Image (cartoon, helix red, strand yellow):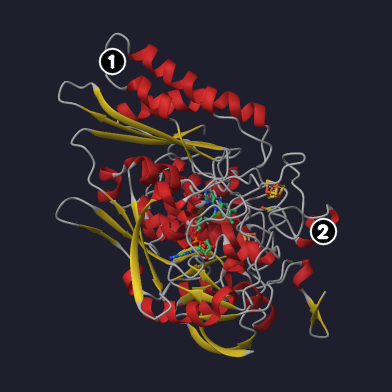
Amino acid sequence: MLRLPKFEVAAPQTVDEALALLAEYGADAMLMAGGTDLVPNMKHGLFEPKLVVSVSAIDELQGVAIEDDGTLVIGAATTLQAVATNDEVRRRAPAFAQAAGLVAGPQLRRMGTVGGNVMLDTRCQWYNQTHFWRKSLGFCLKKDGSLCHVVEGGSKCVAAASNDTAPTLMSLGAKLVFARRNSEGQVVRKTLAVDDLYKSDGAFNKKVAGDELLIAVRIPAGAPQHRGAYGKLRDRGSIDFPLLGVAVRIDLDDAGAVADADLVAVALQARPIRLKKAAEALVGNTPGKPGWDEAVDAAAEAAYGQCHPMPNIPGDHDYRREMVPVYVRRTIRAAVAGEGPVHHV
Amino acid sequence: MRVLNLTVNGDATEVAAPAHWTLLEVLRYRMGLTGSKQGCDKGDCGACTVLIDGEPQLSCLTVAALAEGHEITTIEGLLPAHLRAGGEGPDPVQEAFDRCGALQCGFCQPGMILSARALLSENPAPTRDEIKAALSGNLCRCTGYTQIYQAVELALAEATGAEPASPSWAPGENPWAKTPEGNARPAVGAAGLTEGTGVAPSGGDSRTNGKAH
Ligand SMILES: Cc1cc2nc3c(=O)[nH]c(=O)nc-3n(C[C@H](O)[C@H](O)[C@H](O)COP(=O)(O)OP(=O)(O)OC[C@H]3O[C@@H](n4cnc5c(N)ncnc54)[C@H](O)[C@@H]3O)c2cc1C
Ligand code: SF4
Ligand code: FES
Ligand code: FES
């Protein structure tokens, strides 16, 4: 039995009401969408807000829309199940839909939201534990303590970004719309590239404050010959967080050659990381034509050189490293074939 | 403490509970609905699965106050709902779990049955792979899952009168099919004694002097 700490709950109906509560309570308030990350974390004594502000009743945060220029607009409180099964999302942003469909298990995808996934707390096997467990170990830098159990002598937390949709959104050049109340009490909105949301600090890997409400995720229209896929390594075929995630975007030109590509990996460090050299290895090559297999191998090799999994999340880190080129290769192949996700079961 | 207006198994109820209680705690410790099991209590196991507006969700991660305004169905509600809809006896999924012996300790069964119920309500002809995917958020530590998948296929076969897409028996040889004399095979668990109906409490949930022990 794991009890929640005491808190009060509010379920505002509008963005303005939610922001007013955040402004009033300051650091004592926390936003909650599906609660599938926040509730276990509160049960583990990692967060103890006095007020939980649920965003589930705010209509503006719900649903998927397509703008005239082809931009996909996804309300922050739209469930992962809703985007994973939405035909337009699957067609326009296959990697993102695949990643959403592989988050956790069926019940959790019906509760968990896109916004909650983007804003997911980083994870570490020394952190996502009960208060009793963490106390027995003397706590750690990220919460209540002063040292890191992953990097001996380390002064910076390296807990891993473990959100499956984040690397896909980065590869798609997605933008995030946030709202907050400024010191004059006015509601101001800002748009931030997903790339610019994350920073390499496992203690808190985002550049926005707790009083900023994510309203929507905007995915720009893809290239005419857009290809995308997501690969996820995990212990079981369901429920588990990623031990490694690889997002691939490939844009083909009229002749079928790779005009542009982007690869992003997650579940390694505090933020999703762009595999620039791996993407460069693909550009100019044509799937199925001579030189393609070598290009894919070169991409896999470049990714292997760049990715160094740490013992921050469960799973043997040497094994996770060896799986980097395997998943990069398979996910590229799935993307060009219009298939995916890449999943070992 | 606040008074929550919850709709559980078709009935509107007022129940007082602290704001930080989960729906699972309210169901079990305020309403005595111990069919929903408290397994991991943190989202891993699916034992606490309930239907919220018909969708399988985890009551251990649901703040009870936020479930106001939604239709909550627990394992205890399936049989009455089936009777109300003009059916006889338990829900066909419960009946099939009973006849296939799709349980050993029974702890996972309420959650399994609710996930299976939601699947069959949404997809009238799931394949074996779709059944596996739909139940993949419900862990069972005893059965090895085979009888559970068979039970879902049996419920499907009985509901549609057709063989399932990927049956676990040879064509026309459904070992659990009802015969005029009754079941071809004796039911493994007697209905009402299994967890699946939520009627009889399992060991840890039985009460003496009003206290769970
Ligand atoms: C057993 C288990 C397995 C899981 N497996 C996976 C997995 O494989 N992959 C994965 O990616 N995740 C996994 N998760 C985590 C989680 O279910 C998902 O990441 C989900 O998308 C979180 O969304 P939520 O709406 O439930 O977030 P919440 O828990 O409601 O919120 C998460 C964080 O985001 C903030 N937040 C939420 N909405 C907003 C908003 N609109 N604006 C600003 N901040 C906001 C909250 O304050 C909180 O800090 C798992 C969880 C469990 C319990
Ligand atoms: S990496 Fe893990 S052990 Fe180290 S400070 Fe971060 S959470 Fe704690
Ligand atoms: S008790 Fe809710 S998922 Fe295990
Ligand atoms: S029957 Fe024991 S957990 Fe499934």
Image quadrant holding the C terminus of chain B, namely bottom right
Quarter residue A331 falls in: top left
| B18 relative position to A198: left or right | right
* Residue shown at the point (35%, 54%) measured from the top left: A83
Which residue is identified by label 1? A288
| Subunit of label 1 | A
Q: Which residue is farthest top?
A: A290
Which residue is identified by label 2? A135
| Depicted A6 relative to depicted A313: above or below | below
Q: Are marks 1 and 2 on the same chain?
A: yes
Query: SS of the residue at dot 2?
Result: helix
* Residue shown at the point (51%, 67%) measured from the top left: A210
Q: Amino acid at mark 2?
A: Lys
Give how far across and how far down residue B212 sits, in percent: 79, 77
Q: Which residue is farthest front?
A: A184
Q: Nearer the viewer, residue A119 or B117?
A: A119
Image quadrant holding the N terminus of chain B, namely bottom right
